[in-house]
Each structure stands twice: as structure tokens, then as C-alpha cells.
Image (spheres, rainbow, N blue to C red):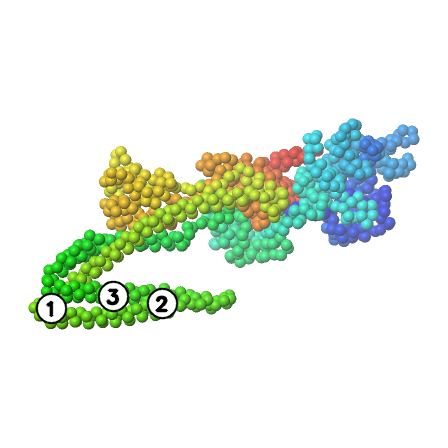
Amino acid sequence: MIGSTWNKWDLHLHSPLTHQNNQFDGISLDDYANKLNEVELSLVGITNYFFFAEDELERIRATINQKGFNIKVVGNLEFRISQPNKDSEFINIHCLFAEHLSTARINTVMSKLKVKNTTTTGGAIYCERNNLQLHGVKVEELMIDYAVLNEHLSQNFKRGIDYLMVVCPNGYGGFRPDIKEGRSLALAKEIDKFGDLIFGSTAKDREFFLSGRGSNLPPKPVFLCSDAHSMQNIGTKYSWVKAKPTFEGLRQVLIEPEDRIQIVDEFVERSFQKPHFKSISLRGKLFPNQPLQFQTATLPLNKNMVAIIGGRGTGKSILLDSIRSKFPYNPTSPSARTVDASGLAITLDQGDGSEILFNQPSNSYSYLHVSQGDIQQVSQKPDVLSSEIKRMLGLNEATFDQSQTQLIQDCLARYRAYIDYRNATDSQGNWLNNESHQQSVIDYNNELMKTLTNPQNQGLIEKYQRNIQSINQINQFVAQSNQLLNSIKQSIDPLNDSIAQINLNTLLITPIPCVDHSATTAALQRNIVLLDKNLETLAKENETITEEFKNQGINQDISSLLNKVSECQTKIDAANNKLKEIQEKNTQYFAMLNARKVFAQQYQTYLNNQKLAVDTAFAKLGQQQDAWNHEQNKLVQDILTDINIYGSQLFNLDVFYNGLLNCLNGGKFRGTSNQTSLDKLKQTFNVHSIHDFFKLLMNEPMLEIPEAQTLISLEDFCWKNEYFNQVGRFELLDYLYKPQRIQTYLHVNAEFKYKGKTVDKLSVGQRGTFYVCLKLATDPFGSPFIFDQPEDDLDNDFIMKQLVPLFRSIKKYRQVIIVTHNANLVVNSDAEQIVIANNESEVLNYQSGAVEDGPISSTNSIRSRVCEILEGGGYAFEQRERKYGLTMNR
């Protein structure tokens, strides 16, 4: 059920029943079978010369079966052909027979084969024990003509169905394909054509026969075999084969001569630790109040490639949706169905044999899952696709620096407070925080003071005035000091509370001292006490001045006079203080304008860095990874061949101006028959590019309004109240300076080109192709990859020319599970396991196996079901086999 898996084969070893060079020393078939099991062979080619011993294959199979060993047997006859090689050695060839042929049937056919040897009178000798004994010919003396053998076998059996021919390139009896000239070269080529597979011994043999060999010959698999003639040699040499241990499995190796066989112990699919879903336990209903349900069963899964096929409504995609429902925190798909697969459980092999059972409603595991509709959902929306590209490149959606965001928000808040400050009025409508108004207060009260003085009282009044001025200054300073004390307490106390919490943390190594502000507060309090004493002194001096008025005999209402003096001086002092305050506020105002300019520069840098991050991440993606082997690196580079990803600063002018219009008085930009509102707005603001936008933010003269003779800056425009609604300029400034508002019209997208075309020039299928390529390139190895019906969203040319080869390579490094209606994806990707979905009265069940399961002619074989279910399945099989020179009728 689990499909094609790696197992050990030895297609050339002799048994205790061999005719020639028998070194088994009379051991029993029981001991022989035990040895085969001990060395973990799954398929053996029981070899004899020219013909088998009586019932040889059946006797060995029976012994193996009696012991309960899972070892399959095919027959192998070894022949010596009469044409010698370059070294005058006779060349050996082999014939492998399918398991459905009995020993008797094979021997009967061979008994009618004329050998090259003849009787003393020149008569014919046949390849049969009694005939050889009759004419006194030993088996080791026999020779045949390979053309005669070929014709005889083809007349009695079907090549590829009943038998396959094997040739040996090197060693005793080899045909030496590496020679360069002469008759031996011609013979070598002919024998190469004659063989379906190769018995070789080295990596050089394998490399040579997988190539075209300069003669456009099909690639052929090379098997390493023991040629054991004794118990000691069994298990010393063997091949690793990814196929069912059957003759039909052997046919698949001929079709996939590189990927389905290895002649060394260390190769990727044995050494690479690959997490994979090992099995799925199925049971229970899938939707509330609906009869659709899984038949209770456990479906084992191949760790390489699993192809799920079936007719419409048979439960293919719903099986994948059920798997996805177990992992709600894996990036979800808006197009995925919500399935109540509470009865489904998944076993994950972590690659080292340890297992995790996912049987809870919510499980955490990261793997790659592409559901139906996922690709279209993403690829048709540029911003969504950009976010997905960034995520695949390992880039989080970068937000503008939070501290800088807070600074600009504080700046805008302070600016708003400044404008409110400047616009404050008294009950008479005077602008309280206007320099002209405050200066008029000073001038008025100074003139009033002149009317209160005369030569007689001037000295005393000026002295009193100075004291009042000092008192006002002291009171102001004390008020500032008390405000500072409160600020210190409000700032430092919460900070010390946080430090106290940190000090309670068990991870703390060195205690953190609290912030000590006692010296600061003590100094402030001492100043307040001393200044309070100064106030007392000044108050007494003013009392003395009152007495002096009386002593000098000044005949005035002293109390009223001094109150008026005090009132005037207080107003003058207040106005002077206000002028200082206004000057400070103005300085802060200009600092705020500069802060906005700094922000604009920082935001430009932020956008540039985002663009650079995309560029760098993609460049890194194509770099050689030391942790990968050559094939892995080449695989990723091949995936990326037609892809170029780059960061792009996207400024959406339509969105920008539509948002801008909402911040202004629309009446000033009312459209006419000749000009729309947006056109008027564009004419006013003159922002046509990202460069223009940042010039606007940095207060460069850009805006054109009828009231101004020259271009004005954004800040100058903000003082034109007629261009704003009730909310005023603040909505505009928020729109232009707050990062969360800016990103609605200006941001960095991950743009791409596929085959040199930008996204707007690509078909939906090509966009999908790009998306899948990037998915695989950014997460190529490790966790399983599940893909539901790739043919729905991908370019067909890509499927045939790139996706099929990609699946063939990548499945070595990660499990691939697909649902498909495309025969080429199943057949040409050489899916190790094929799962056939069935729906019987709303009960879903799944049959699985390998393409080599069952005889070719059987209607119930996996191959027949593939041809039945998938349109073009038969043609796909035929083309695949023809590519390697193998057909059912050969």
C-alpha cells in the first residue's frame, strides 16, 4: 500500500542447485533461504547456466515461503555467446524471467534452442540437460549466437512482459564498451543495443550507461550483483532499488534508470533525514448533519511523492482539506473548506524515526500547503502577492520605527497645541498669545504709570514698582519650581516602580538601583524657602514705602495709588513674561517644522531600507548554501532561473489625492467642465512623484494658489484657513506625516519579473507558476509539501517542462503530496505512491499502491486504474516507456 520504497536486490547469485562452479558444499535450501533473509535481500535473481535445475525456482520459493520470509524470486539464465571480446574472451549475457513463468516452462523453451556447439557429425545440439549428456558436452563448454538466442526468445516469450536481457560491460566475459575502434567497437555497440539492463560494478559503469554513449542509445540501469557461488559471497554486493521487488518493479527501473537504483549504500534518500507524514488514520463524518464520512482505515504514506487521483466527488481534495484543518495556525487559506475532521489523526515521522501524533483539534506544525484557489487568491492581488513574497523571503512586514513614530505623533500633537495657543482669545476677542497684543498691554500700562507719578512721588513709586516687579519674578520662579517638583515626582516614581518590578525577576543577576532625586528636590525646596523669606522682606519694604509717603506729607490716597501701581506693574510683568513665552513657543514651533523635515528624511531612509531588504533577501536566496549538496543548490538555482524579485517604492497617486481631498475644503477645489476636483488639487500641490512628495513634507515651496505670486510651502498653506474645513490643518498633517496614514498610499512592494515580464504582463497561470516556484525556492527542503490540483492554476508548459522535473528532484528532500487530474504529473514525475479515492454511498475510502503493483494486463492494477481515471494516462505511460526504448510489445 505504501508504494515504491528502497530495498536490496541481487539479480545475479547462484543457488545450491547451480550446474557449474558450485561452492555451496551441499548446504540445504533452508540454510540458503536463511542466508538470503539474514542479508536483507528483497528480490533475488536465482542464476543458472543455460537452463535451470528441475523445479529450481519453485523449490527455492517454497522454502522461502515456508519460513515466512518476504523475499521474491525471479529466474536468471546465464549464456556464453560465441562472439569473443577484444581480449578473445567469450562474452556472457543473461536473461531475467518474470515470476509468472515456471521453471518447467522456461526449460521447455530453452530445450528447443540450438547451441553453437555441434555433434561429431555436425548435427545440432540443444540447450537441454539430456541432450548435452547424450552428446557428451559439458555446460561450461556451451556457446550460443546472441542473434539466434534473441530470435528464439522473442518467438516464445514477450520481451518486457516475460523476460529482459542483461549484458555485462566489464570483467571476465564483458564486452568492453569503452573501446574506441575496430570490430570490437561494432560488437560492443550491438551488444549494448541487445541488453535491457547492465550488470556492472563501478560508478564509472553507471555514469557511462546513463549517458547517450555517443550513439543515442537510451540510458540503462546498472545493477551491482554478487555473482555468489558460495554462502560467503551472498550479501557482499547488491543494489538498492526503489520499486516493488517484482518483475514489474524491475520494468520501472528500466524506465527510471537513474532515480530508482543506486549501487552504493550512501545516497541522498537513505542519508537525508526528511520529516514526512507517515500515515493518516481516517474515521468519522466531515460536515455536521451530512452523511459524508471516511471509512475507518489507516492510510500509510510514502515519504517521497504521493499522487491522489479519482473521479469527481470521490474525496481527493477533501482529504487534503482535512489534513489542513488539523493545523489551523499554519498560514490559512480563505479558499479552503472548513472541515470537521475530528476523527482524522496524522502521524509525523520526524526523519529520525521518532514520531508525533497530531490528533487534537488544533496542532502546531509548519509545512507547505497549497489548497485549491490559494494561488488565484494571492496572485490576482498585487499587494497581497507582495506581502506573500516578503513572507516567503523571510521578511516581516516592517513597520516604521516605533520611537520615531511616537516622536512625530508627539510633534503633531505639540504643533496642534501651539496652533491652539496662538489662536487663544480673551472675552474681548484679543489674541492673547500675539506679540502685538502683549506689546500694546505693556505700552498702555507704561503710559498709565506716567499719569500716576509726579515729581513729589516719583522716587517712592519707582522704588515700589521695582519691589512689585521683584515680587512678581519671585512668585513666577516659585511657581515654576513647584511645577518642576510635581513633574519629578510624576516621572521618577513610576520609573522606580518599574525598577522595583525588574528587581523581583528571578533572572536578575545584579540588582538595579532606583533613581534618587532627593538631592534635586531638596535643592528646589531650599530655594523656595529662601525666596519666601525674600518675599517677606520685599513686603516689609513696601510697608516702609507707604509710611514714607505719609512722613513726606504727600496728600494722596496712598492705598489706591499703590494698588494701581501694583496692578500696572503686574500687567507689564505678565506681558513681558508672555512675550518671552511666545518667543519660546515660536522657537519650539520652528523646531517642530524642522522635526517634520527630519521625519521626512527618516521615512525616505526607511523606504530605501525596505527596498534594499527585498533586494538583499532575493540575492541571498540564489547564493550557494554550504549546508546543501550540489544537487540541492542546483535545484534552487534552477527554480529561480526565470525569476527576478526586487523592492519597489509604490506611490499610488490616485489614492493619495483622493485622501488629500478629504482633508481640505472641497469647495475650494470644486470641479468645472474643464477641470475635475482632483486635477485642481494636483495643480495646487504639484506632487507627481515620490520625490515631489518628500519635497512637500520638507516644506519646500511647491504649492500654487491664486492668492500668492510665487510657490508657497506646505506650512505657509496651512495658515490659509479658507482652504480647510472646521477641523483645520490637523487632518491634513496627520494624513501627510503619520506613518499608518502614509502607508495607505506610499509603501514598498516586493515586485517581480517572471521570464522578463512584469506581473501585469503575465497570465494567471504564469503568476501561479511564479508563486509556486518561489514557495519551493524559499522553503525547498524538509517539511512536507501538499499541493491540491496544481494544473488548475499553473501554466501547462511549466508543468511539463519544469514542474515534473522539479518534483522528481525535490521529492528526495521533502515529501510531496498532490491531488491531480494530470496524467503527466503522476506518470512522468514517477510518483512512488498512487492513492485512488473512491466514494461509495457517501463513504470515502482510499486504495493505494505503486505503479508497478499488479500485472500490466490486470484491470485492477494501479497502472490500469490510472489509465482509466486520468485522461491521457495510457498515452503518458506509452511515451514514458518509449523514451527509454521499452514497450509492452517489445
Q: Earlier in the sequence, mark 3 or mark 1?
A: 3
Dot 2: few (<14), some (14–19), or many (≥20) neighbours within 10 Å?
few
Report, in whole angstroms, how far the alpha carbon at label 3 lies from the one at label 1: 25 Å
User: Where does label 1 land, which residue?
Assistant: 558
| Quadrant of image for the C terminus | top right
Task: Kindly indicate the quadrant of the structure image that contains residue 664.
Answer: top left
Question: Could you give the CA–CA distance between mark 2 and mark 3, rounded to whole angstroms?
Answer: 19 Å
Asked if residue 802 shows in the view, the reply is yes
Name the residue located 47 percent from the left edge and 44 percent from the top edge.
Answer: 612
| Residue sitting at the far top | 182
The mark found on residue 474 in the picture is 3
In the image, what residue occupies the spot 19% across and 59% down? Answer: 572
Front residue of 601 and 353: 601
The numbered mark at residue 765 is none
Image location of residue 705, percent across then percent down = 26, 40
Type of amino acid at the residue the image marks with label 3: Ile
Q: Nearer the viewer, residue 361 or 576?
A: 576
Q: Can you identify the residue that label 2 sits on? A: 520
Q: CA distance from mark 1 to mark 2?
A: 43 Å
Query: How would you rate the neighbour count of disc 1 (Cα within 10 Å): few for under 14, some for 14-19, many for 20 or more?
Result: some
**884 above or below 398?**
above
Q: Is residue 889 left or right of residue 295?
A: right
- Could you say whether the residue bearing mark 1 is in a helix, strand or loop? helix
The quarter of the picture where residue 442 lies is bottom left
Answer yes or no: is residue 846 visible.
no
Q: Secondary structure at mark 3?
A: helix
Of the two numbered discs 1 and 2 on the same chain, state the one appearing first in sequence. 2
Q: Amino acid at mark 1?
A: Ile
- Which residue is at a point 67% across and 40% down the rendered structure image? 258
The residue lying toward the viewer, choosing from 266 and 561, is 561
Query: Quick one: which residue is furthest to the left in this view?
Result: 555
